[in-house]
Amino acid sequence: MKPTDLHGIFPPIPTPFVDGKLACDKLAENIAAWNATGLSGYVTFGSNGEAVYLSDEEKLAVVKTVVQAAAPGMKVIAGTGCESTWQTIELTNRCARLGAHAALVVTPFYYGGRMNEAALLRHFTAVADQAEIPILIYNVTKFTHISVSVNLVAALSQHPNIIGIKDSNGSVSALGEMVSRAAEEFSVLVGTAGALFGALTLGCVGGVVALANVAPKACVRICSLLKKGELEAASKLQIKMLPVNTALTATYGVAGLKAALDMLGYYGGAPRPPLLPATEKEKSEIRDILLTAGLLA
């Protein structure tokens, strides 16, 4: 099933709620606005998508909405990783039938002590064997406390239906090793904008980065500048965006990202409980960061 073109920037989109209920109309409006920014596609149910708070039926409604709202040619990557292999296969194929182009499969983590390389190899291989669309490995140790080694990535990259990895751990050296050791058509995508510049210079094909939700054009421009060999301009833009990325990932999290979206003319809204919305103090700090970065007038 390889190859699938994963070059470019993909935002891991937040899931909008109104009074705690899924708001697909707001999601469609956000997608319509993002369509015009140069993004390559969308990722549902990354760590910003509050996937652990959604039912399977809600997840399917989100995927259906994104597929219908995305501009022609844009890729839709559905986060389908569940704790069991069987459940992951089932959700992956249901999303495939709704039009998702690929699936992002996070490492199972509840029984973390038993998620050794043998277990992960069997899990990802079984999912890839039975998935109706290509899959990407999702490595996000911050939340799962599981790390997919470079050795395991190299082994899994040989599977014809495992087309890439989103690695959110932020180690540029590890990303470079993955690029070096993985199969030729395997795509390595950086999962944090803090490492975007470094990752792209080492051969990553793109990024799935939270920053792209609020600064899509800046993220796309970093990519295009590097393609043209304009390293200094790309570096300056990366540095300008770093405080925004830190604020929306490490400091304020999903609630902060949603607050920033509201300020920038998208729909953010509140996260789903038990997550708390951003406080007024936090919103004021976020606004100042967006102003300094030139994202707010």
Image (cartoon, rainbow, N blue to C red):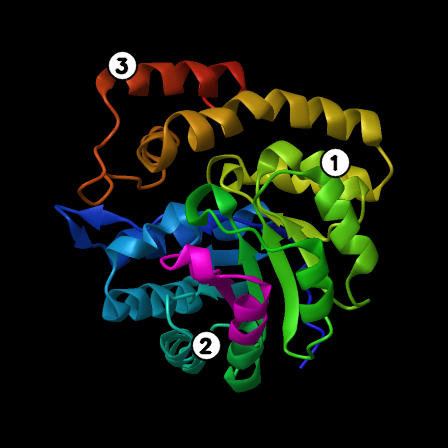
Badge 3 marks a residue whose secondary structure is helix
Q: Does residue 244 sit above or below 161 in this rendering?
A: above
Q: Amino acid at mark 3?
A: Lys
Q: Quadrant of the N terminus?
A: bottom right
Of the pair 270 and 54, the residue shown nearer to us:
54
Mark 2 or 3, which is nearer the eye? 3
Sequence order check: which comes first, mark 2 or mark 3? 2
Sequence order check: which comes first, mark 3 or mark 1? 1
Identify the residue under disc 2.
99
Residue at the image point whose x is 62% and y is 59% from the top: 165
Please provide percent x and percent y for residue 138.
54, 57
Instruction: Give the residue at the far left of this rendering.
Output: 19
Q: Does residue 82 sit above or below 283 in this rendering?
A: below
Q: Which residues are magenta?
A: 101-123
Sequence order check: which comes first, mark 2 or mark 1? 2
- The total of numbered circles placed on residues is 3
Q: Is residue 216 left or right of residue 279?
A: right
Identify the residue under disc 3.
281
Residue at the image point whose x is 62% and y is 21% from the top: 240
Q: Amino acid at mark 2?
A: Gly
Residue 119 on the magenta span: yes
